[in-house]
Amino acid sequence: MRQFIPDRLVSARLLQGYSLQDLADKLNNLVSKQALHKYEVGEVTPSKEFISKLAEALKIDIDFFYKIQKIQLHSVEFRKMSLLAAKEENRIIEKTKEYISNYLEIEEIIGLKNGFVSPFVPPININDLNDIDVITDSLRKKWGLGVDPIYSVVELLEDNNIKIVEIEGGDEFDGLQAMVNNEFPVIVVNTSLLKKDDRKRFTVLHELGHMLLPISSIPLKQREKYCHQFASAMLFPREAMFKELGVKRNRLHIQELGALKKQYGISIQAIIMRAKDLSIISESYCRQLFFYIRQQGWKIDEPFNYIGHESPMKF
């Protein structure tokens, strides 16, 4: 006889973003939130009839309550706004766990193993952009990329056994990264917010930076800066930057930057920041360019689109 698993009720509720009171309301207050809590901690087992009502209220199949969940996320790190509610965080985490559980079940059926091996990254202290470039150059070499544009960042990471999950969320988070059962990494991106591929590419690599860079002990603001620089350097390595733009420029043209965006899949704004970081352009000229971008209304919606396509395919 199958046994009701209390933790699965918790997961199902969090997947919908419900509090205990929300679920009680969905059930037309047939039971109190206190009674639901007893179901969730295993003090009381609901009847078969009430399990059916729970499944209907939570929009899931009854079998969900009987399926053992073996997925744990460790070292979860969100790229989020401070307004992201705890209920939404929990919903995203539970949705990720459910996706990964199904992913691993299929891999097990067809006999695939995760086989994740952390790429070699020099164990150095990061003090400036040059250290970031040393690491990205090493990683590109390890993955056989040279200095060429990366056609699909998502496909590259999937080929190296990093799971990529797409979730529809609000405007309060871009993505997250975590370890699954302390065995392999997962990166989650918010498709509701990251509608353009250049932003998705940058976010995925930003999360990869959090995963690989030795920056856990430094302040959050500096970690974010280094991960921004890591993503930019992976998309547009310095050797390619110098080849495309030269070592010193007094002026950059939007059409020129747009062409590079199409080729390398990196936003115009990220190219400008990368050019400033590599001292190709001055800081004052960088500010001028960003002022112009704001005037044109391009801060959120830039012109020119990347010609590639970013979407998880392996699952």
Image (cartoon, rainbow, N blue to C red):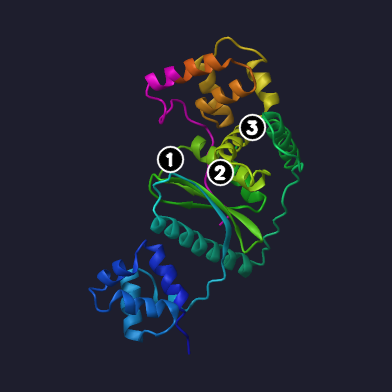
Q: Residue 50: which quarter of the image?
A: bottom left
Q: Nearer the viewer, mark 3 or mark 1?
A: 3
Name the disc covering residue 204, or none: 2
Which sits in the foreground, 101 or 84? 84
Q: Residue furthest top?
A: 250
Q: Which residue is mark 1?
A: 195
Residues rendered magenta in the picture: 291-315
| Residue 313 screen position, x and y as percent | 55, 51
Question: Which residue type carries mark 2?
Answer: Val
Which sits in the foreground, 217 or 16? 217
| Residue 24 screen position, x and y as percent | 28, 72
Residue 306 vs 223, above or below: the answer is above
Q: Earlier in the sequence, mark 3 or mark 1?
A: 1
Q: What kind of element bears circle 3?
A: helix
Q: Is residue 89 magenta?
A: no
Q: Residue 282: which quarter of the image?
A: top right
Question: Which residue type carries mark 3?
Answer: Ala
Q: Which residue is mark 3?
A: 233
Q: Earlier in the sequence, mark 3 or mark 2?
A: 2
